[in-house]
Image (cartoon, rainbow, N blue to C red):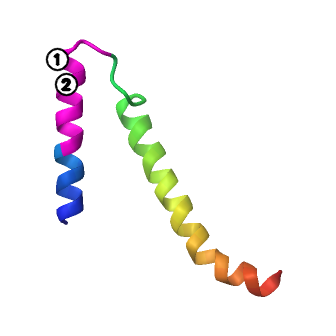
Amino acid sequence: MKEVLLALVTGLVVGFLFAWFKLPIPAPPALAGVVGIVGIYLGFRLYNYLAPMMERIF
């Protein structure tokens, strides 16, 4: 839980600084960005789940 809170605070600070300096946000549009990050995470977890099975086959 500590990592999640640190990530949230870091994101808030970075977002605030980018807005303050009137820079474009360093991420894709909100929903697409969240879905992309979730997809990356799920793909990583899927690989960790399937890798032991694939090693037995190959």
Q: Residues within 10 Å of mark 1 (few under 14, many from 20)?
A: few
| CB atoms of marks 1 and 2 within 8 Å | yes
Quote the CA–CA distance across marks 1 and 2.
Answer: 5 Å
From the viewer's perspective, is 43 left or right of 19? Answer: right
User: Which amino acid type is shown beneath numbered disc 2?
Assistant: Leu
At 44% from the left and 52% from the top, the residue drawn is: 38
- Residue under label 2: 17
* Residue 1 percent across, percent down from the top left: 19, 66
At 57% from the left and 73% from the top, the residue drawn is: 48
Query: Toward which corner of the image does residue 43 lie, by quadrant?
Result: bottom right
Magenta span = 10-23
* Residue 39 percent across, percent down from the top left: 50, 52
Residue furthest to the bottom: 56
User: Which amino acid type is shown beneath numbered disc 1?
Assistant: Trp
- Residue under label 1: 20
Q: What element carries label 1?
A: helix
Q: Is mark 2 on a helix, strand or loop?
A: helix
State the residue in front, 50 or 26. Answer: 26
At 33% from the left and 23% from the top, the residue drawn is: 25
